[in-house]
Amino acid sequence: MSDFETVAAMENPAARPGPAGEQDATAGKPAKVRSLAGDAWRDLRRNPIFWISLTLVALVSAMAAFPGLFTANDPQDCVLSRQHAGPSGGAIFGYDFQGCDTYARAVYGARASLIVGVCSAALTGLIAIVVGMLAGYFGHWVDAVISRVIDVVLGIPLLLAAIVLLKRISSDAPSVRIMAVVFVLAVLGWTTAARVVRSSVISAKEQDYVAAARMLGAGNGRIMWRHILPNSLAPAVVVLTIALGSFIAAEATLSFLGIGLKAPTISWGIDINTGRAHMRESALPLAVPSTFLALTVLAFIMLGDAIRDAFDPKLR
């Protein structure tokens, strides 16, 4: 190999020396460059925790959307003569103190909990994106004011404030209670996601593509929503995925205390409270909804952790 060929091979490894007139099949083809999302997906595919948590999330989502696929029993079919009856062919986990199928109520309870969690996370994300974008992009006094507001909201205990606010709602209509819980959780839980969005926007607005868009005459609105936002969403999605599990747990806690959802709505928190009062007679009415709740919250937290690890360059 000549000195020229040696230098060429060092500069371009794809260019290998060969007989005159012979060309490498890969010569002249640019190397395929993976994006951040491509690298993250490659890592996620190799992570068993991601697949386990994703399977649990898909199972709970299917349970909430199509509960009839998981049980043929009616959760409202309660007969007192079956009070605390043990497991049987018709009810694999027995009956509660009202004679209701414990398993059927746990299956149908997934719907209310998932609706509250998803809607709360969506509303939280909307608030966090708007507030975080404004603070991170404009900076100066806008950032200072918004940061102080975030500090104030962070200083308010979520459950305590939720109890106080939900106590003011006198209506027991299921739709009203669900929307009230969603609104309260979102209003009190947007601060962490907003800080993440703010940090991502501060980093993204210094990039060359933002300067190029500004030089081409793009306004602030177009730069924020068309250029900065798509490149700042990944960290917020991770935070919201973890927050979704926390919102489901918060809803169950509020319903357990009699502040959140109320009967006739079927909720894991309501059933846990009912099972606690009669756990000496039968432990299954308490254990079954508690297990469903724990697995659901754990699945969303594990999923968020797996996505965070995949998107964090420091962990590669």
Image (tube, rainbow, N blue to C red):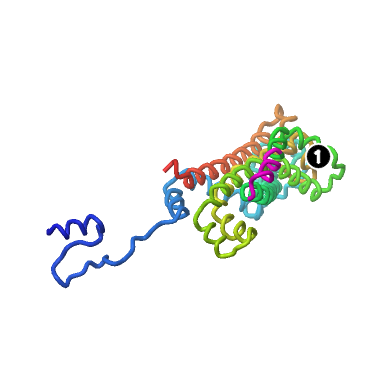
Relative depth, front residue between 315 and 212? 212
Residue where numbered disc 1 is placed: 166
> Residue shown at 75%/43% (left/top)?
184
Q: Foreground residue, 117 or 57?
A: 117
Q: Quadrant of the C terminus?
A: top left
Does dot 1 land on a helix, a strand or a loop? helix
Task: Give the residue at x 74% y 35%.
Answer: 256
- List the single residue furthest toward the bottom: 21
Q: Quadrant of residue 100?
A: top right
Q: Quadrant of the N terminus?
A: bottom left
Q: Residue at x 14, y 57 (%)?
A: 3
Q: Residue 316 versus residue 19: which sits nearer the camera?
A: 19
Q: Is residue 220 left or right of residue 185?
A: left
Above or below 289: residue 197: below
Position above or below: 283 against 145:
above
Magenta stretch: dominant secondary structure: helix
Residue 194: % across, % down: 64, 45
Examine the rendering and report whether any part of residue 71 can be seen.
no
When the figure is inspected, residue 155 is found, relative to residue 177, above or below; the finding is above
| Circle 1: residue type | Leu
